[in-house]
Every structure is written in structure tokens, then in C-alpha cells.
């Protein structure tokens, strides 16, 4: 599917590679055709802010990999989480989210969405029932990450999805760190979002995001709980989305995300970036096992090092966290490894500054190995309490292990740890 889903060859040129359709607009056949497209009576291209043939292949391919019915590619992972929620929630509504989140998502939820009137309530995912306890009549969605860094404790997807389903609340999963290893829709999630910037693209070249609609959530049955999809939408001919798209399959959610939120907020991905991410997806099934294998070796190696006080990686966990890793991740525990140095912040800084092979960058999921000190960078806009809630202690170092030979990775870690006194 990573190589073939959504595309065979270009019908007019025979091109096997997906062409980059670098166009803003599409010539309508005639006025009837144009109005049919705008009225959603006929599928077709209107304008690249809302759809593009290159992007369309990426959307179909990622949706196929996740077992979803349709995808929507957007400008970044941030745009995918924002649009995924804004498709369902407006001012006065609320969302219940796991505390274990990427720092950028935390900021979006704790500040920007709140400023816009969407109250995001954070709960500890260790107890799935926390999601039910935080819900009320205006709760429109649950949100979490499959393998949240920095804690790297796998989220209880099926448990929270089933609480949500009993209340008419869909679970939206950010699966950025675990593509292919986990298919959240198989466990009851309704929507999956990605920062395609990471493993999907895989080479650190292009920012992008994808939303996948599972088509497995009964929005109509949820009734008043999901007014965005069940009541007339004045911005689209007074359409109630569950009714308007009945003939097209269970795509009300993704249709509203595209034709209302993406149309209005404009976070479109460029066709070139969609092409780059597609190139990455073609080798995802080869890269993920290698990321996992290298990362597992690094975790075991770090655990034996005297100056390392703690290693954060699913293979090092026990109890419920380990059980969830075994249940939800197949084929490996991912490419991210965290560790704490006994020497605290100072030795963390020395370690990062001494790396020669690993890059010191904010990204994850690159083919190259990467390192960062989250407390002073990715999570620095959070206060100390919020940092700890997301799992960032002052001496925490995050590694995103790449595809290099394991000996080269370990040699660099070894020399940098030695300089850091570990
Ligand atoms: N979700 C996760 C888990 C991430 O790690 C990131 C980025 O680091 C994002 C979302 C945001 O993605 P982007 O940087 O593509 O906007």
C-alpha cells in the first residue's frame, strides 16, 4: 500500500511517478460543471487550497495505510490537529485531551484554542476513566498521542475510544510517532492525525500534516452531541453534513474538514511537499523497522551506562505502560528514546554540545539521528509544572534514532557521554 495505494499511472502521459500538479486552479468544462462541483454534486478539482491531484494521492495512500475511508493533507502537523478539532468544536464547546502531548500541541490547546473559546481539558491518560469524568454535554472530542514523547507511554486507545463511543464522542489520535506500528482506527479511534513532517516524509525535507477519517463513527446517531455535522451549516448552503454526503459514504467529518475549515483557514499543503512526503511514504515499511531496531539497541546500551540515571523507552517499562506498548505497537517500539543524565541539566547540555554525528535539532523522525534537550527548547514555553505533566524533567534528553549503522550511533553517544562525565 505504501507503494501503490491511490495511484497507478497518469492516464494521459503514462507517468509512473505521481506528477507534481503545481497549479492553483482547474479549468471547468462549462458553467454546469462548475456549479455541480461547487454544490458537491460532482467530485472534481476546484482550487488547490481545498484539493490537488498530487495531494489527493498522498491522502488516499495514508488513509489506506491506516484503514480509513478518506484523508485530508494540510500544511503541517499543527494544522492537522487544529483542523481536526475545529471541525467538531466551536466557542463554548470543549475537548478532553491527554496531558502527554507534543509541546506545540499543548500550546495550541492550552492557549490558542482556549482564546478562541474552545476549552481543552487536560487529563492524565494513566486512568482512561479520567476522560469520562472530564466530559459534559458540550464535549465534542477526545484527543491523545499514540506514543507521546517525551514519556513514551503508549495511550490506552481502545479503552478511551469505547468510553467516547458510549457518549457519542470520537477519539482523535495523533499517530505521528508510530505510523505502521499502530493503526489507531483498528482500536476504535475515529480520526487519526499526523505530522507528516516526521516519519511519513522521513527525510527532514518538508512540513506537512494529514488527517484520516476512519469512517467508523456514527455521527448521525450522536445527534445533538455533534452539532457541527448534524445541524445546518450556514457556510455551505445550510447543509447538515451527515445528510449532504449520504451518497458518498461515511465521509461527513472529512468533507466538513476540507470544504469548511481548510477552505476558510487556508492551511493548504503545497503540491511539492505532498510529492516529497509521498516519496517518503514509499519506503516507510523499510524505515520503521530499522528506526525501531536501532532505537531498541540504543535504549539497552544506555541502560547499562553508569552516568545515565533513567532510560525512557517502552522496552524499559513495566506494569500497565508495558502492557499497553505490547498491545498497541506491532513490530517495534518506535524510534524515539529518552534518557536522564545523573549530572542533570549541565551534563545534558555538555552531552548535546559534544555530539558529532547526531544533529541537534527540534525535529523527530528524520533518516538521520537527532538529539535535543526539551526543557530548554521544544517545551520551554511551558511552565515547570506543565513541563513535568508532559514528562519533561530538567535533565531529560530526547533522541530520535535514525537509520545509520548502529555502531556509528553508539560511538557518537559514547564519546559525547564521556565528555559529559557520564
Ligand atoms: N504532533 C507531534 C507528535 C509532533 O511531534 C509534532 C511536531 O514535532 C507535531 C504534531 C506538529 O507537527 P508539525 O511540526 O508538522 O506542525
Image (cartoon, grey):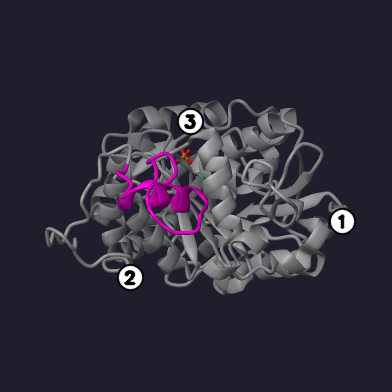
Provide the secondary structure element on which disc 2 rests.
loop
Distance between the alpha carbons at the discs numbered 3 and 2:
44 Å
Q: Nearer the viewer, mark 3 or mark 2?
A: 2
Q: Taken as a whole, is the magenta stretch helix, strand or loop?
A: loop
Q: Magenta segment range?
A: 26-53
**Which residue was labeled with disc 1?**
133
Q: Is mark 2 within 8 Å of ligand 1?
A: no
Does the stretch in magenta take in 49? yes
| Residue neighbourhood size for the residue with mark 2, other residues' Cα within 10 Å, grouped as few (<14), some (14–19), many (≥20) | some
**Which residue was labeled with disc 2?**
1
**Residue 56 drawn at (x, y percent):** 36, 55
Does the stretch in magenta take in 84? no
Nearer to the camera, 90 or 304: 90
Q: Is residue 131 above or below residue 220?
A: above
Nearer to the camera, 408 or 253: 253
Q: Nearer the viewer, mark 3 or mark 1?
A: 1
**Number of residue marks:** 3
Q: Quadrant of the C terminus?
A: top left
Nearer to the camera, 7 or 184: 7
Distance between the alpha carbons at the discs numbered 3 and 1:
41 Å
Q: Disc 3, disc 2: CB below 8 Å?
A: no
**Which residue was labeled with disc 3?**
347
Amino acid at each position: 500500500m505504501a507503494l501503490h495505494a491511490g495511484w497507478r499511472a497518469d492516464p494521459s502521459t503514462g507517468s509512473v511517478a505521481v506528477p507534481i500538479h503545481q497549479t492553483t486552479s482547474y479549468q471547468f468544462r462549462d458553467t454546469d460543471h462548475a456549479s455541480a462541483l461547487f454544490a458537491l454534486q460532482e467530485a472534481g478539482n476546484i482550487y488547490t487550497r481545498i484539493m490537488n491531484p498530487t495531494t489527493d494521492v498522498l491522502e488516499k495512500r495514508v488513509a489506506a495505510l491506516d484503514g480509513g475511508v478518506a484523508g485530508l493533507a494540510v500544511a503541517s502537523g499543527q494544522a492537522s490537529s487544529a483542523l481536526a478539532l475545529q471541525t467538531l468544536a466551536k466557542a463554548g464547546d470543549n475537548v478532553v485531551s491527554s496531558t502527554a502531548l507534543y509541546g506545540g500541541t499543548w500550546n495550541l490547546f492550552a492557549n490558542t484554542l482556549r482564546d478562541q473559546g474552545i476549552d481543552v481539558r487536560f487529563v492524565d491518560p494513566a486512568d482512561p476513566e479520567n476522560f469520562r469524568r472530564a466530559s459534559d454535554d458540550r464535549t465534542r472530542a477526545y484527543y491523545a498521542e499514540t506514543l507521546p514523547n517525551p514519556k513514551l507511554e503508549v495511550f490506552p486507545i481502545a479503552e478511551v475510544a469505547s468510553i467516547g463511543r458510549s457518549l457519542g464522542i470520537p477519539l482523535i489520535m495523533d499517530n505521528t510517532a508510530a505510523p505502521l506500528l499502530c493503526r489507531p482506527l483498528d482500536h476504535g479511534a475515529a480520526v487519526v492525525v499526523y505530522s507528516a513532517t516526521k516519519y511519513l516524509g522521513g527525510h527532514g525535507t518538508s512540513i506537512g500534516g494529514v488527517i484520516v477519517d476512519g469512517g467508523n463513527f456514527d455521527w448521525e446517531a450522536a445527534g445533538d452531541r455533534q452539532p457541527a455535522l448534524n445541524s445546518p451549516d450556514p457556510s455551505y448552503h445550510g447543509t447538515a453534513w451527515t445528510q449532504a454526503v449520504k451518497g458518498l459514504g461515511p465521509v461527513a467529518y472529512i468533507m466538513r474538514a476540507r470544504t469548511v475549515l481548510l477552505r476558510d483557514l487556508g492551511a493548504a499543503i503545497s503540491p511539492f511537499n505532498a510529492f516529497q512526503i509521498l516519496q517518503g511514504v514509499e519506503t516507510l515499511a523499510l524505515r520503521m523497522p530499522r528506526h525501531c531496531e536501532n532505537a531498541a539497541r540504543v535504549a539497552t546500551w544506555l541502560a547499562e551506562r553508569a552516568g545515565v540515571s533513567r532510560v525512557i523507552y517502552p522496552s524499559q517499562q513495566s506494569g500497565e505502560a508495558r502492557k499497553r506498548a505490547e498491545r498497541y505497537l506491532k513490530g517495534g517500539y518506535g524510534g524515539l528514546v529518552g534518557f536522564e543524565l545523573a549530572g542533570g541539566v549541565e551534563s545534558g547540555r555538555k552531552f548535546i554540545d559534544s555530539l558529532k554525528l547526531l544533529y541537534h535539532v527540534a525535529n523527530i523522525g528524520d533518516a538521520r539521528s537527532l538529539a535535543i534537550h526539551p526543557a530548554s527548547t521544544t517545551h520551554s514555553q511551558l511552565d515547570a509544572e506543565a513541563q513535568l505533566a508532559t514528562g519533561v524533567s530538567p535533565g531529560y534528553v530526547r533522541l530520535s534514532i535514525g537509520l545509520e549503522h548502529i555502531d556509528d550511533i553508539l560511538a557518537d553517544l559514547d564519546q559525547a557521554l564521556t565528555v559529559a562525565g557520564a
